[in-house]
Amino acid sequence: MGVTCVSQMPVAEGKSVQQTVELLTKKLEMLGAEKQGTFCVDCETYHTAASTLGSQGQAGKLMYVMHNSEHPLSCFALFENGPCLIADTNFDVLMGKLKGFFQSAKASKIETRGTRYQYCDFLVKVGTVTMGPSARGISVEVEYGPCVVASDCWSLLLEFLQSFLGSHAPGAPAVFGNRHDAVYGPADTMIQYMELFNKIRKQQQVPVAGIR
C-alpha cells in the first residue's frame, strides 16, 4: 500500500449525505476514475471495565477495535492516545472473553461504506458514515500507491484532493507529522479513520458510553 489521507467531506448545502456522495463520485468519474469495487471500514468502542479501575476514581480508557476490507484477515486495536495493535480476525473472539477487562460501549458501532475508484496511481474511496440506521457524514480516502513516505508525496496528494474536493481539501493529517521519514503503514490509515469517526460522533453529539 502507499501513503493515504483520510478526511471528512461536509454535506453540500441543500443536499443530503447521499446526494453529496453522488456529486463527489460524478466528479471522480468526469476526471476519468474507474470503479474498482466497494470498501468498508468499521469501528467498535470498548472501555475498561469498572472492576479494573480500583477505588481511587481512575478514568477509564477507551480502545477501538476496527476492521478494513482492504485487510480482510486483520483486526486493528487502537488504544486512546496509545499504540495500534494489528492482530488476526480471531481478536474479535478474544474481546468477547475479556469482558472482565473491556466492555463494549453501548451504541458505539460506526462504519463507512462506499465505492472504490482507481485514477492513475491514486485509489479513492468515497464512503457514507453511518451509526445504526442513520447516515452521519461522508469520508474520503485517497491513497497514492507508488510512495511509502508521507513527506515525499503530500504536495502531490493535496493537489489531487483539491482537483475534486476544491476548498474542502484537508490539511496534512496529524499522523504524517508523527511519522517524519518513516515508512507509512496500514495502522496509520486506521488512526486517521479513528480520528474521523470520533470527530463525527462529536458533531452529532453522540458520546461514547464510558465509565461514570
Image (cartoon, grey):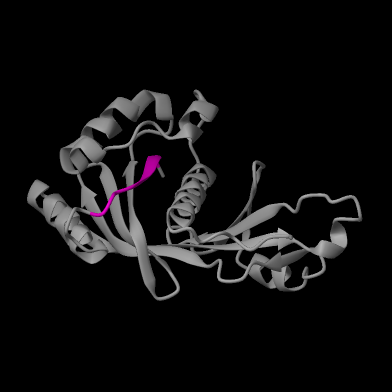
Q: Is residue 39 visible to the viewer in this orientation of the structure?
A: no
Majority SS type along the magenta span: strand
> Residue 76 appears at what percent x and percent y?
59, 55
Give yes or no for residue 131 being in the magenta stretch.
Answer: no
Question: In the image shown, does 187 or 26 lie closer to the viewer?
Answer: 26
* Residue at screen point 54% across, 29% down: 178
> Residue 180 appears at what percent x and percent y?
50, 24
> Residue 123 appears at what percent x and percent y?
29, 48
Question: In the image shown, does 4 or 111 lie closer to the viewer?
Answer: 111
Which stretch did the figure color magenta?
A: 2-11
Give yes or no for residue 4 being in the magenta stretch.
Answer: yes
* Residue at screen point 38% across, 71% down: 134
| 92 relative to 134 in the view: left or right | right
Query: How many numbered marks are there?
Result: 0
| 50 relative to 179 in the view: left or right | right
Q: Is residue 81 visible to the viewer in this orientation of the structure?
A: yes
| 79 relative to 197 in the view: left or right | right
Q: Quadrant of residue 112?
A: bottom left
Vertical order, 196 against 131 (above or below):
above
Extreme residue in the right direction: 55
Extreme residue in the bottom direction: 133
User: Which quarter shows the N terminus?
Assistant: top left
User: Which quarter shows the C terminus?
Assistant: bottom right
| 126 relative to 203 in the view: left or right | left
> Residue 126 appears at what percent x and percent y?
28, 56
* Residue at screen point 75% across, 54% down: 60
* Residue at screen point 34% across, 28% down: 154
